[in-house]
Structures are given as structure tokens and as C-alpha cells.
Image (cartoon, helix red, strand yellow):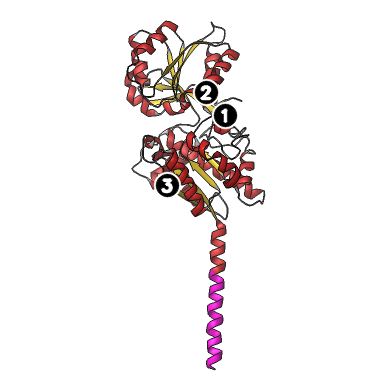
Amino acid sequence: MGRMRGKGIFMGLLAVCVLLTAGAAFAAGDEIKIGACQPITGRFAFAGVNINAGLQDYINYANEMKLVKGKKLVYIYEDTGYDTDKAVATFKKIMAKDNPVIMYGESTGQGKAIAPELNSRYKVLYGSTSFSSELADPKNHPYSFVSGPTYSDMFGILLEYISKQAKGKARPKVAFFYSDTEFGKDPIPYARKRAKELGIDVAAEVVTKVGAVDVTTEVLTLKKAQPDYCIFQGYVLAPIPEVVRAAKDFGLKTTFMGVFWSVDKSIIDKLGADAEGYMGVNPYAYYYENAPGITAMRKYNERVHPNEKYRPNSYIQGWFTGMVFVEAINKVLAAKKPVTGDNLKDALAKIRNWDTGGISGRVTFVDNKAAVGRVYRANVKKGIFEPVSDWIYVK
């Protein structure tokens, strides 16, 4: 009797163990891990905090809405302080500990530094804060992608807009005003070529240090060239306000333009009345626009973060990148394949004419980027940027 009772207890414990083991395996199989090296501190923290919040919020939103059927997305992130060496070490640490199938990086520098091991060892889908043309090269960076257009594409969108405005008039003159950095110089060779193709004269190229304060010499160069448009690249704020104000003081009628990092609403706040007429290209809609995807984002924030009344472009970049991750995962699952870096990479290339609910234009990934954006103009009275074009697609 005692032996039979002991045997019963043993069998019962065994059954519990089997159930627990099966449950644990099922739970592990249900999880899809997404790792991120985020610049939450350091000189890029102004954007990194918001990118991290946007990406994390979208992953939570996707879990709530069960956007990946039968799976739970798990977000793992660490602060890198916008330090490439630390970011590379953080990447390896997360890969060793959690082995995610998707990683998000803090910069162009990190993307280039990890590329050899990403291609040969880790082989996970890799997105980042960067719009670098180099990281969108599928030959050398097959696992990387850009969450929208590259800087070259953004110049292409602005130049196409300029070309259309000048239709039937004299050849427009444009100046390129950029920082002496990799960030600043990235799109310039393409921009020169594209301007020539579109019949636009490059009247001047002005190069400065990042954050330059005394821009008198540079503005005098613009005064001599008298460009109709001047496009900034490689800056977030300084020296853009200084150049715009000095140009007005010198009587220039030039229209100033920026790309993603310099068309945030904060530049209107910084420039005040001098922002009137300032323009730029944004791959995403603004937080205040009435598009279904943006409305869903606002409602999520109203419910989960009631104190957050506005979200900047960098938050929307993080949210949009989360959408891309989910779209790629669902394509892999629909094909009944395992969710691996290789399959996610292949799925990204199959995203075609994707409706993002107006957060961006219709998205098609070609060469690991989605070359679409819209041109906006500052309305100082309203304190916002307003669209002056439809979504523009470039190749």
C-alpha cells in the first residue's frame, strides 16, 4: 500500500513536471525577441529617448492588439550613450544573453562596425536610427535596412519638388549647406548628379563644422550665389537658425530646407517668426496629422501616457520601425517559415505597396530602404509644419 501510494505521488509529480516543461517550451516558442542598443544618454539622447519610446510603445501596442498571431514580442534594450565602442559591446552582450532575431542600433557608426560579424556570424535583421546610404547597400549590408528613405533619397525628393515648382520658369539655383562630417557629406555626390539631371544649377556648396556659431563668411557666400533654395544636411539645429537669420539680415530671398533631423517642430520653436517659409522633407506624418495610423498612435498615448501631449518625429521613427518589424515577422509566419534573421531579411524585400495608415506613404522596400517622403512648410502662426506636396516616391 505504501509502495503504491509512493508510486502514485511519483507519477503525479512526473506529470506536473512534464506539463511544466511542455508549458515552458511552448512559452519560449511563442516569444520573438527584439533587441536594441539605444542612445538614451549622451549627445544624441534628445532623439534616442524618443526613438526608444516609440519602438517600445509600438511593440507593446502590437502585443495588445495581437498583431502577430500566437506570438508575443519581447523588447530588450540597453543604453549605449551614443558611443560606438559601447554600442558594439552592447550588441554582442544582448546577442549572447538573449539571442534576438532582430536588433536595432544607435548610429551609422555602429552599423558599419558590426557589419562583418552581422553578415558572417549573427545574421539578424538590423534596423537603426541611421538614414545612411551606405547601410542601405544590400550587397555589403544584406541584414541592414533604413526605416524610410536615405539622405540621398531625401535630397532627391526635395530636388524633384524644386524642379516641379520651377516648371516653365528659369533654371532654379540651389545651394547645399552641410557639415564636414560623414552625416553631412553622405548625400552630396548623389545630389549633385540629381540636380544636373533635373536641370537645377548648384550655385554654391558651403561646408562648416557641426554646431558652428559664427556663420558670417558662409552667409556671404550664399549672398554672392543668390540661390533660390538652400538645403541643409548634417545638422539638427545649430547653425541652421543662425544662417536663416543672418540671410534675412542680408536681404536674401532664399527658401531654406532641411531633411528629417531638421524638420522637427522644435526648429519652429527655435526660429520663431524667422521660421516662416522654412521647408523640409519628412518620411513620416507629424503627430498632429489626421491619418488613421497617427490617430491610433495618439489614442495609444492618451491611454498609456496621458501626460504626453506631443510626440516628435524621432518617436514616430521608432514607432514606424516597430511596424516594419511586425510586417516582416508576419510575412515570415504567413510563409510558414521559422522566424530567423535570414527569413526576415528576405521578407523585408517582399514588402510592396504597404499601407501604413498614413504614417508614411505606400511603402515598398527596394535595396533595403523605402524611398518615400513628403515636403512640408512651416506655418509659424500655427506652430506646425504643413504638407505642400503629396507623398513623393524616388528610385
Instruction: Locate residue 286, reporting x and y percent.
Output: 44, 32
Q: Is residue 343 left or right of residue 291?
A: right
- Residue 12 part of the magenta segment: yes
Quadrant where the N terminus sits is: bottom right
Instruction: Locate residue 265, reporting x and y percent.
Output: 39, 28
On the image, numbered disc 1 is attached to which residue?
A: 371
Labels 1 and 3 touching (C-beta < 8 A): no
Mark 1 vs mark 3: give the one in front. Answer: 3
- Amino acid type, residue under disc 3 in the picture: Glu
Instruction: Locate residue 170, reporting x and y percent.
Output: 53, 5
On the image, numbered disc 3 is attached to which residue?
A: 78
Labels 2 and 3 touching (C-beta < 8 A): no
Secondary element under disc 1, as helix, strand or loop, is loop
Mark 2 vs mark 3: which is more N-terminal?
Answer: 3
Mark 1 vs mark 2: give the one in front. Answer: 2
Q: CA distance from mark 2 to mark 3?
A: 30 Å
Q: Residue at x 55, y 19 (%)?
A: 189
Quarter-wise, where is residue 311 in the image? top left
Mark 1 vs mark 3: which is more N-terminal?
Answer: 3
